[in-house]
Amino acid sequence: MDNKDKIIREQREEIRLLNEEIKCLQLLLSQAGIPYGKGIQEKERPNSGNKHLRDAVFGWYRYDSRFALPVYDEQGVVERYNVYHVSMLVRHAKNGNYYLYDILDIKKETSNPFRF
């Protein structure tokens, strides 16, 4: 096995792990009663430089989004929502599909918690 095959195998494993993280996030959001993908998409920033022609022919996209998870009190009533900001890097491949490449950060917004 040469070095190129090793790098490709490592990249595939990394993508598999990222997909597992997304499945966990989807499960967490669905358990909280929030359909996946119903967050607020704030920004889409394309990046289609020549250096990406090999691995992302149609470019990379960085998405900034927000989602909220409920916080329950002792009686099981929703007390408030914790709002989170997430930045994701998405690859637009040669086959036309979009692939989640990385979750860059997930940060809890602490300025104004959303309350009922």
Image (cartoon, rainbow, N blue to C red):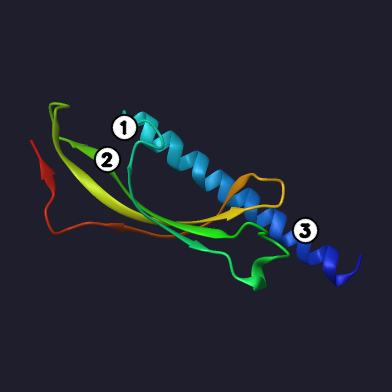
Residue pointed to by mark 1: 32
Q: Secondary structure at mark 3?
A: helix
x 81%, y 65%: residue: 6
* Picture quadrant where residue 4 is located: bottom right
Few, some or many residues within 10 Å of mark 1 (<14, 14–19, 20+): few
Residue labelled with disc 3: 9
Q: Amino acid at mark 3?
A: Arg
Asked if residue 115 lies left or right of residue 10, the reply is: left
For marks 1 and 2 on the same chain, the one whose residue lies earlier in the sequence? 1
On residue 69, the disc is 2
Instruction: Look at the numbered discs 2 and 3 and tell me whether their residues touch, using CB distance below 8 Å.
Output: no
Q: Is residue 1 above or below residue 69?
A: below
Disc 2 from disc 3: Cα separation: 35 Å
Left or right of 3 on screen, residue 92: left
User: Where is the C terminus found, in terms of image quarters?
Assistant: top left
Please name the amino acid that badge 1 sits on.
Ala
The residue at the point 13 percent across, 49 percent down is 113
Outermost residue on the right side: it is: 1
Q: How many marks?
A: 3
Whole-percent x and y of residue 67?
Answer: 30, 44
Q: Give the residue drawn at x 90%, y 69%.
A: 2
Q: Mark 3 and mark 1 in contact (Cβ < 8 Å)?
A: no
Picture coordinates of residue 84 (x, y %)? 28, 51
Disc 1 vs disc 2: Cβ atoms closer than 8 Å? yes
Give the residue at the far left of this rendering: 116
Marks 1 and 2 sit apart, C-alpha to C-alpha, by 6 Å
